[in-house]
Image: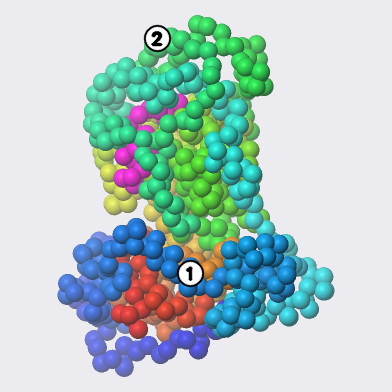
Amino acid sequence: MAEPTAELGKLPAPEATGEAPASNANGAHRTPEELVAKAIAPVKSEFLRPPPVRPSCSSGQGEDAPEAKASAPQSGLVKEKKSKRQLKRERQQEKKSALNLCPEIAKTGDISSCRYKDKCRFSHDLEAFNTQKPADLEGECPFIGAGEPCPFGLACRFSGTHKDAAASAATPSSHKKSFEMNSLKKDVQRLLWKNKMRLPKSEARLKTLGLSVHNKSVKKILEEVESKEPDSKDCSVANGNGCKDAVPSEMTSKDHPQEVAEEDSAVTVNDAVADEPPPPKKQKNVLEEENSTSEAKNGTHTLQSASKESYTPTEQEASTDNLMTENDRSLKLHPREKKLIDLRDKLYLAPLTTVGNLPFRRVCKSLGADVTCGEMAMGTNLLQGQASEWALLRRHSSEDIFGVQICGAYPDTVARTVELIDQECTVDFIDINMGCPIDLVVNKGAGSALLTKPMRMKAIIEAASGTVDTPIAVKVRTGYFEGKNRIDSLIADIGYWGGSAVTIHGRSRQQRYSKLADWDYIYQCAARAPDSLQVLGNGDIFSYVDWNKHKSDCPSLSTCMIARGALLKPWLFTEIKEQRHWDITSGERLNILKDYVRFGLEHWGSDKKGVETTRHFLLEWLSYTFRYVPVGLLEVIPQQLNWRPPSYYGRNDLETLMASDSAADWVRISEMLLGKVPDGFTFAPKHKSNAYDRAENG
């Protein structure tokens, strides 16, 4: 990795510019109390500076203004909207122009080592590859010390250090072996592609719940049951708010989504949404469904369905039905009697889309996180064998308590997914997301849409918890509509249905991430929960003071989940464990970024593609970290998560650079760690607050 000192130029100090140390735009003439009331970080006046004026901001406002962020046009190539066909054509042309060396030859350096010979789709021209290959990056190969040769061989961007690695590999090392788990096996992927994967436990569980009826999809069965529910106006919650508002019609009436093309390794909600019909089953005898009776209980209802005729299994399915015969059903463990996971007082890193990847989780583990969870994966995509979705389930050996989070709209999808994960992966718990606010998820009946359908929630949790012995956790929001909370009326039932833990994000779906989290409501829910159900709170934790307050205010709270706070300062886990405000230096922050880059190269690869993938996710992370304001620069501590940082100078050039909200400066930091960006490089963060184009930013 490149040395940062050579790349970092001198930035002007406040005295050198001749500018006033503060401006009205930054709130210089306001008291710290007034700034805090306006949700502006109260930076000491000697560090303030006027907001920088950039050409890309045509609105005349600074880029730190929210209005400017929302309306600022994307610069250069980033603002050009290209069709999918055009993007595909460009990718194909890029593949043709790039000389991709055969991986087997790259490892060995021997042209004759490839078993495919002339039929290989990769290049065997070593001389042409070496001519085209960019210069090696500074630093050493991340695979040195692993005791094995670099898997990328000649294609590694640090191949010049492999000779030293070969010499050091001869001597025994005390370095602890690092490895990853939960990779998708090729034979499993082929079975999933052909829809031939046997998942007998989920089939048996669905049949027990009356959700596996011949010639009737689970969606139709649930719609019939939900249509018999009383009007939503009768469904009151304990805080006095009714739930008479219904979910928008498009959430339940849309047809099943068609398959969407795969995108990058980041989570894409377009792909996913577990609204597809279940795979076709083998011929079975028709089960007659009894008229189900609905009983109101705390705003929820129980689903009862039994068959009048006995089911006659085929020879192939005898093993499936033997699991759930009438004689041994009474011997089956109740969900609450199964093994549990103890999350009490543990520091839990929340599943974070895009940025919460495996290298980032490793960084948080090294800084004190106890529990980690993979990014949200779509159940339908996992069942289809999509490699990009399975990548979200990967686990590192350092993650001693690890779970995965899945999302699905129907119990059959979720039940099959949890059985597949339990069968093919090593996880300590499975979390079902019932709080995702994204429109493309909600409009298909998944995520937060489930908060309006307690019968669907019941069926999903019962199906999942009854299929596997792995503990099932649930993540929810306070409700769908703002001011109409309803989780307090469901909290006891979630434990009865088979949930081992529930995480409550203190906002409604309608709020998204606006306003502050409602922790008083989280406390109310925790007090109503049964002893067997662990309740976790989530929302706006950004210091050890926040953590201590929530734990002392509500002793029945098992622990707190840390989400966006870890994105801005992953050393938050260290602060909580050591009970201090860490005034971390810019050099220490840079070392954390170096660790992330090293972990990223180990995960995504040290070849050209792996380096650029690592750069992309590093830039995504830097689009959050600039919002952190160092402790030594604040008038009031600790910083709150909703504070907007003004433009300010750091205590040195590197700290000033890290405080920049310009994507060009984030790219500059990435170049300090991963070398120069390639020609034509562009970057636009997922949250669209800024963009970088090489042509515009030099």
305 or 527: nearer the viewer: 305
Q: Position of residue 671 (x, y in %)?
A: 47, 79
Q: Position of residue 326 (x, y in %)?
A: 61, 11
Quadrant in the picture for the N terminus: bottom right
Label 1, residues with CA under 10 Å away: few <14, some 14-19, many ≥20: few
The quarter of the displayed image where residue 435 is located: top left
What's the distance in space between the residues labelled 1 and 2, CA to CA?
62 Å
Was residue 444 drawn as part of the magenta stretch in this picture?
Answer: yes
Q: Is residue 218 above or below residue 470?
A: above
On the image, numbered disc 2 is attached to which residue? 291
Q: Is residue 33 visible?
A: no
**Residue at the limit of the structure toward the left, as seen here:** 60
Residue at (50%, 89%) from the top-left corner? 6
The quarter of the displayed image where residue 368 is located: bottom right
Residue at (40%, 9%) from the top-left corner? 291
Q: Amino acid at mark 1?
A: Lys
On the image, numbered disc 1 is attached to which residue? 96
The quarter of the displayed image where residue 67 is located: bottom left
61 or 77: nearer the viewer: 77
Q: Is residue 662 above or below residue 490?
A: below
